[in-house]
Amino acid sequence: MTLKLKRKPYWVQIITFYFSSFLIVLCVLPLLFLADNLSESGNGPDVNSWILGIVLAPILETLLNQHLPFWLIQKWSLTRNKYRLYIFTSAIVFGLCHTYSLQYMIFAFSVGLILGYTYFFYNKTPKIAFWSTTLIHSLRNGSTLLIAIMANKL
């Protein structure tokens, strides 16, 4: 799939990663429902937090959750070129940064897998890797904000 996707135009790649970030959540839905029953609070951040999350959070989180783990793993010779380790580590860090509830952490981990893979996919050009991952994260946060606004109006 990676080779086929690399041959596609950039906008097709971004759309593929964006929709994949929603599809991967379907794989963890049973865990999300289980975690919802176990967590103390099912509340995520409020709508005002999401507005800030569309611009600032994706930049900072891409730096801390995708760029930094990739850089550290590439620096250590035993883990260099271990892309699965990087993607998994990146997703764990991403999930642990979203501690609103256990359910939300599982959700964030699953999205973190796609964001980590996106960063890896473009890693030959670090600026493109960073900004593509940030763009997908921003689009996800923006979509979630719109859904939350629409749900509150119904």
Image: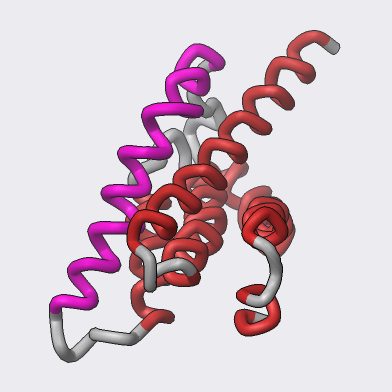
Q: Which residues fall within the magenta stretch?
A: 47-75
Can residue 24 be seen here? The reply is: no
Place residue 111 in its image quadrant: bottom right
Q: Is residue 45 left or right of residue 94?
A: right
> From this viewpoint, which residue is outermost toward the top?
153
Can residue 25 be seen here? The reply is: yes
For the point 39% across and 33% down, the residue is 57
Q: State the predominant SS element of the stretch in magenta.
A: helix
State the scheme by which the image is colored.
Answer: secondary structure
Task: Note whether 128 is above or below 58 in the view shown.
Answer: below
Q: Is residue 133 left or right of residue 33?
A: left
Closest to the observer: 54 or 121?
Answer: 121
| Quarter of the image that includes the C terminus | top right
> From this viewpoint, which residue is outermost toward the bottom?
78
For the point 33% across and 53% down, the residue is 65
Q: Position of residue 78 (x, y in %)?
A: 18, 90
Instruction: Look at the image and say whether residue 71 sits in the magenta stretch.
Output: yes
Q: Position of residue 143 (x, y in %)?
A: 67, 32
Label tally:
0
For the point 57% across and 34% down, the residue is 141
Place residue 2 in its image quadrant: bottom right
> From this viewpoint, which residue is outermost toward the right?
154
| Quarter of the image that includes the N terminus | bottom right
Instruction: Look at the image and say whether residue 121 sits in the magenta stretch.
Output: no
Q: Is residue 4 left or right of residue 76?
A: right
Closest to the observer: 2 or 79?
Answer: 2
Task: Note whether 35 is above or below 68 in the view shown.
Answer: above
Q: Position of residue 40 (x, y in %)?
A: 48, 33
Place residue 92 in its image quadrant: bottom left
Closest to the observer: 45 or 70?
Answer: 70
Q: Position of residue 38 (x, y in %)?
A: 54, 45
